[in-house]
Amino acid sequence: MIDPQKIRQDFPILRRVVHGDKPLVYLDSAATSQKPQAVLDAIVQYYTNHNANVHRGIHVLGDESTKMFTSARDTIAKFFGADSDELILTRNTTEGLNAVVYSWVESHIRKEDTILLTEMEHHSNIVPWQRFAKRTGCSLEYIRVSPDGELDLQDLKKKCTKHIKLIAVAHVSNTLGVINPITDIVELAHTVGAKVVVDGAQSAPHMPINFHTLECDAFAFSGHKMLGPMGIGGLVVRKEMMNEMDPFLFGGGMIREVTYEETTFADLPDKFIGGTPDVASTVGLATACEYLTKLGMDQVFAHDHELVEYALEKLSTVDGVNIVGPMEAKKRCGSVAFTYTGVHAHDVAQILDSEGVAVRSGHHCTMPLHEKFGWIATTRASFNVYTTKEDIDALVRALAKVKKVFSRV
Amino acid sequence: MCSLEYDTAMSDLYQEIILDHAQHPRNFGVLDNPTHTIRELNASCGDNIEFSFHIKDNIIQDIAWKGAGCAISTASSSIISDLIKGRTVQYAKSLTQHEVFREIGVSSILPTREKCLMLPLRVLRSLP
Ligand SMILES: Cc1ncc(COP(=O)(O)O)c(C=O)c1O
């Protein structure tokens, strides 16, 4: 089992106090995780000693920088059980999902086809498809979410017809916290010849991911949610699909030959690296991957499970708190969101913050799901490797203040 | 932000007047025969409000509003609805954030809550 108390030593920001003398209780890791010293050092080290553009300057720094960039890419791909040529670096999950639209969907999905999503998707996994559908007239359908907050697999079976060309689905919901059965979805999708694109933003930080055994066609993730820096993420794509993809960012770096009339593109992976990449962040993310690998993703997942179980147990005893999503810890990962009877989530979060407890409040970019369930907004506590049970105890204590403030009048 | 400033801002936020308006909002509901109805959404928190107005001779004769929002947007809507009832449309449209501060009795708002406070002002800006 990993020891979060020991891990916390690696995260300087967790030593901060807020509002005078309150220790920071950071329960907003699903929005973005904190970064270990090793990641911060890797970035500073890169800029301090090696900074130069990649694949361009024939000089010592250029060589070092290029080598660091290539090896960081390899490390990131390996972390996801993928080959280096299967990784397209992006800024984040959002850019990865948009990349699928511009690079593959544009040339493979027609007016008479259907794209299948689920009712629990993040806006990042709705809006790109919706815009494409509006542009081309293709159909969009949504797999139903059951009242207890799980994907309705019967509905998936019903809707997975030969018209479906692509299914885009979150691996883990950032609101319901539920883990979706990707391998079952892939099996069904592939029988009708549909591609499966997985939004891995909330699974990559917590679960061991093997892209090849997951069998989906593409998997998008954000580095900043998995202990890496902001501004770097990726899209892992199967070779067969990758071969059918066109670049979507044109310019320097991604070309083989340019004349005034024509351009031919570079080979993978350069073909998808338009312009100067964020080398320092790529190196930072590779360091985060190494950090997680050293902890062991099985251990990381087991730690998360313990926290989810504890949070479900503790929060369900708090007066006024109504947990959303399934109540069985083994079906969930990463976070627990709830409504508070009679108090808006923003007010809950503000009062929790006054006790040093940082949570997320609002609709967490799942407005349609909130609308479906009739939640105006929810409050979400989310975890990472440095989260302790004491953090959850602090949340429960701070929730008592919500009641106190709102019973004043 | 330094903590002293913050604590003031926090206790400012949940002072009596805001909590009172949040829990007993004035002019809450809908008008039977509104001349104007305006909806606004605070996309960051899902707060949704709808104001209905009865405007005659350029005067807001009657006003009602409804919505589900946080304490700040609810109190702000409630206070503003009281403030502009019986006043001219121009007055309502020209209300500023500072005047709302003064009415509530705060000197500032945390940057993350500004949108909540401003939600009803955005409604007034869309008046004809
Ligand atoms: C499930 C899910 N998908 C997509 C995203 C978007 O991630 P990013 O903002 O890093 O692109 C998030 C992050 O909030 C998320 O939770």
Image: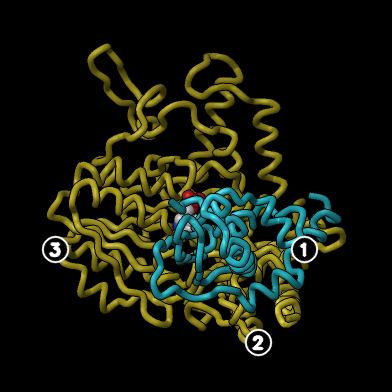
Chain colours: A yellow, B cyan
Taking A270 as reference, is A282 left or right?
right
> Distance between the Cα atoms at labels 2 and 1?
26 Å
Asked whether mark 3 lies closer than 8 Å to ligand 1, one says no
Res. A393 in view: no
Along the line of sight, which residue is nearer the eye, A283 or A162? Answer: A162
**Image-quadrant location for residue A61:** top right
Q: Are marks 2 and 1 on the same chain?
A: no
Residue A349 or residue A43, whichever sits in front: A349
Kind of element beneath mark 1: helix
The amino acid beneath tag 1 is Asp
Instruction: Check disc 3: other Cα within 10 Å, few if <14, some if 14-19, many if 20+.
Output: few
State whether residue B112 is above or below residue A55: below
The subunit carrying tag 1 is B
Residue matched to label 2: A319
Q: Position of residue B107 (x, y in %)?
A: 77, 54
* Residue at figure coordinates x 24%, y 50% from the top left: A134
Q: Position of residue B55 (x, y in %)?
A: 45, 61
